[in-house]
Image: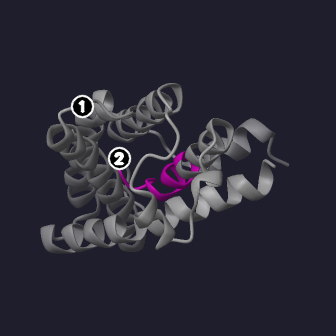
């Protein structure tokens, strides 16, 4: 029987330098968002389209949601530094694409609003780490640039639903 530590390592897979850089950038980004938390981060009308209201956005719930998303990204990115097959590479591309979009979104909001938003300080590092991971997955798995790009776009498109699900799980868990 595997020890809990060896089980976790097997589940998370090999953590090479590029994957470590990506996961570290995401963890730092999440920590910044939690520490600088100001409540509802975007237009309440936009949140209603995802069936989310302001009760989802408490610091404790937000922290749990970001932890759930971080674990999800860690599980999806095993192909960043070591080959695990095409499907795994496309999952890693989807996760990295979502993170690249997250970083870019923070930078665009900061520039458009001429003001800091929680996550903006670490957004450039997250964006660059995600783009490097995309290139690394392409090379590691021998995927075409087109397939990596399409998977990244799909991950970006799916990220609002993933965020809503994580916030919903956090709200159901923490009353």
Kindly give the residue lying farthest to the front in the view shown.
45
- In percent of width and height, residue 109 lies at 23, 45
Q: Is residue 49 magenta?
A: no
Look at the image and give the residue range highlighted in magenta.
70-80
Q: Is residue 47 left or right of residue 175?
A: left
Instruction: Give the crowd class for mark 2: few <14, some 14-19, many >=20 residues within 10 Å.
Output: many
Res. 136 in view: yes
Coloration of the structure image:
one colour
What residue is shown with label 1? 115
- Of badges 2 and 1, nearer the viewer stands 1
- In percent of width and height, residue 106 lies at 28, 43
Q: Is residue 68 left or right of residue 140?
A: right
Q: Which SS class for mark 1?
A: loop
Q: Is residue 66 left or right of residue 91?
A: right
Res. 143 in view: no
Closest to the observer: 161 or 41? 41
Q: Earlier in the sequence, mark 2 or mark 1?
A: 2
- In percent of width and height, residue 19 lies at 38, 41
Closest to the observer: 13 or 74? 74
Closest to the observer: 124 or 160? 160
- Residue located 32% across and 39% down the image: 18
Q: Is residue 73 magenta?
A: yes
- Residue located 41% across and 33% down the image: 29
The prevailing secondary structure element of the residues shown in magenta is helix
- In percent of width and height, residue 137 lies at 28, 56
What residue is shown with label 2? 81
* Residue 34 drawn above or below residue 174: above
**What is the quadrant of residue 26 in the picture?**
top left
- Residue located 23% across and 67% down the image: 148
- Residue located 48% across and 52% down the image: 73
Instruction: Give the crowd class for mark 1: few <14, some 14-19, many >=20 residues within 10 Å.
Output: few
Q: Which SS class for mark 2?
A: loop
């Amino acid at each position: 029987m595997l020890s809990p530590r060896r089980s976790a390592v097997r589940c998370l897979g090999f953590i090479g330098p590029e994957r470590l850089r990506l996961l570290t950038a995401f963890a730092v980004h999440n920590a910044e968002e939690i520490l600088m938390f100001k409540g509802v981060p975007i237009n309440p009308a936009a949140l209603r389209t995802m069936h989310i209201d302001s009760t989802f956005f408490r610091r404790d719930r937000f922290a749990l949601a970001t932890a759930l998303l971080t674990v999800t990204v860690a599980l999806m990115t095993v192909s960043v530094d070591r080959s695990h097959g095409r499907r795994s590479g496309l999952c890693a591309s989807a996760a990295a694409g979502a993170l690249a979009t997250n970083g870019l979104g923070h930078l665009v909001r900061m520039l458009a609003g001429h003001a800091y938003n929680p996550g903006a300080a670490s957004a450039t590092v997250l964006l660059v780490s995600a783009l490097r991971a995309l290139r690394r997955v392409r090379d590691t798995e021998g995927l075409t640039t087109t397939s990596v790009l399409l998977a990244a776009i799909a991950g970006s498109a799916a990220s609002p639903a993933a965020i809503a699900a994580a916030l919903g799980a956090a709200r159901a868990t923490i009353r």
